[in-house]
Image (tube, helix red, strand yellow):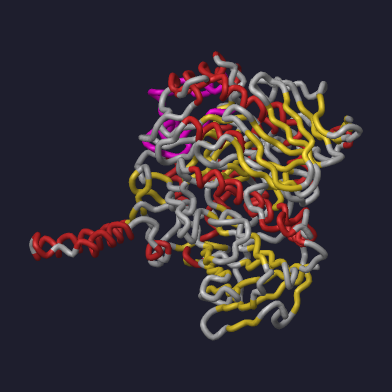
Amino acid sequence: MISKYIFGHPFDTEAVVEAVEIKSGCPETGTFDFSDGFCFTCPLEKEDRVYGLGGANRGINKRGYVYESDCSDNPNHHEDVRSLYAAHNFILLTGSRLVGLFFDYPSFMRFDIGYTRQDMLQVTCKEANLNLYVIEGDSPLDIIRQFRHSIGRSYIPPKFAFGFGQSRWGYKTREDFRTVVKKHREHHVPLDMVYMDIDYMQDYMDFTVNEENFPDFAGFVQEMKDEGVRMIPIIDAGVKIKEGYSVYEEGVEKGYFCQKEDGELFSAAVWPGYTHFPDVLNKEARAWFGDHYRFLVDQGIEGFWNDMNEPSIFYSEEGMKEAMELVAQIEEKGQENVPFFQMMGKLQSLSNSHEDYARFYHNVDGAMIRHDKVHNLFGYNMTRAAGEAFARMVPGKRFLLFSRSSYIGMHRYGGIWTGDNKSWWSHILLNLKMLPSLNMCGFLYVGADLGGFGCDTTRDLVLRWLALGVFTPLMRNHSALGTREQEFYQFEDPQDFAHVIGVRYRLIPYLYTAYMKAALTDDMMFKPLAFVYPEDEMAVRIEDQLMLGDECMIAPVYTQNADGRVVYLPERMMFVKFLPDGSLYTEIMEKGLHYVEVALNEVPLFIRENCCIPLADAAETVETLDTKHLSTVGFDGASFTVYDDDGFGMEYEDPGHYTTIK
């Protein structure tokens, strides 16, 4: 049962799309204080666990730290970082009580979950203008299904999006991309997508292509499709200020960019230099911006990734002016009196400044809303602009679409990747822990930059991370300019990469089915063990293993130089290893602790008792997968119902998509 409590005058985020019973007063879930904004408090008993918050930092159980909903471009995902790229204000309390809470508030919100006091949960924000949804149910999964149903069906990508994608910031020319595809095909390493970062554009301008590097862009896109590969370009939030650039001139003429209080257009520097931000909370401006994706769609593009949409700001005109004034003051005082920390603090504060977010406004149905009051909705509505535009341009066809920044509600239009992580072993584990938290908030098409985006990676790190990425819906190797190149062909023994990535393709019939089941029934694709084995105290504590679908458990190796790991089996299971010669190692293991050996070129998986899963023969593209002749692995006598469709249409309910195999 879901109840809605309205406090003050909330902004309509459109996160919840189902009608919900509205109740007056305050719920009995906790205590409320409105003396200084909004403050919700409830005690935490020793056995209580708190789940949720989507793409937040740290563990699956969020207890013991403080988190902030404040979409932030922060590439340094240390343990002490309180806000990352997204704002997903859903939490689930289990233990002495069982309740789900969604705080629908689009500005800065603080979740103190046993941080100030270990026995206290406190949720605060500056203004008491929000909707609070209280969800009660029989189990954690029951509550999550109710919540997921209320916020609408999760985005369903085209089937090719379940293939492997290679990316790097630094691919600039046709030859750069051709080399990637050529190397994959030469070594028979599967590949379905190559991503185009900001260098494909002309001067970093959205909806342009560098004509010198891509003189016939449509022809090049088709050339890649002939190789079975789709090009996936990036779109950034800022529109370059440049005379003669049609997107800029149209936006100015029609009033579709965010303005300052005095009506002047807000300017901030990002990759292209000074830019304006499209007012994606304005319905007309959102449609206008979305329609510009047609420029690339008409040239054969079938997928996009939206970036820099927190929105990220390098510096504003106002911020830079203040910094220069400080520098001038320092020069007057002489070199001996340089206030180093003051100067460094000012320069560092230029980027993604909250002062800047309070300088511009959105036109929402004629009302001017200051950006910082709806800050967390920008990435959501930028991606919504694209999703709504695709439905107008090519109705009935699925496009690949995912974003860096998001709010609950964006899950209906696209997926997300977890942002600019690092080539750290700890980030494999962070990737794993984010999966169920994101699923709770509706985000099913999710993944991380495998191998790490920032820092220099290593061969063993890439292989171990790929072995986790085999199971995530979005499987992409992506790295930053200036870091060690981490395509498979940069390392010795490329056949190891061919095998690990090939396992992904063998598993696509299972993964696609598990995804579609989760999307169509408001379920989770990845679950904490605690949700499936709530009476097993050991299972409840484990956070480095996950349930996948209804049949499997995954337990990746995430430590350097390890030849395996300890795994806890909450029931009798079949241990499966995909071996580099294409064969399977299988062993029935009883409930309990086991040490399992896993080589760098092997992929481990555990199948629950009385279950089986389908396997396809290895293929180099999703399109060439033979889904009509599948084998199975699992327990004798078990059956599995496979979901398969054309991969592009939206007739999901057709019973002809389902086939049961044993």
Q: Is residue 284 left or right of residue 608?
A: left
Of 507 and 119, nearer the camera is 119
Q: Where is residue 266 in the image (x, y as percent from the top left)?
A: 38, 57
**Total numbered labels:** 0
Of 541 and 383, nearer the camera is 541
Q: Can residue 598 be seen in this view?
A: yes
Q: What residue is shown at x 18% (from left), y 60% (from top)?
A: 327
Query: Quadrant of residue 470 in the image?
Result: top right
Residue 73 is inside the magenta segment? no
Please state, as top left, top right, bottom left or bottom right, where the N terminus lies in the image.
Answer: bottom right
Q: What residue is shown at x 64% (from left), y 54% (from top)?
A: 437
- Return the residue found at the far top: 186
Q: Position of residue 478 (x, y in %)?
A: 49, 35
Residue 218 is inside the magenta segment? yes
Magenta-tinted stretch: 193-222
Q: Position of residue 216 (x, y in %)?
A: 47, 20
Please state, as top left, top right, bottom left or bottom right, where the C terminus lies in the image.
Answer: top right
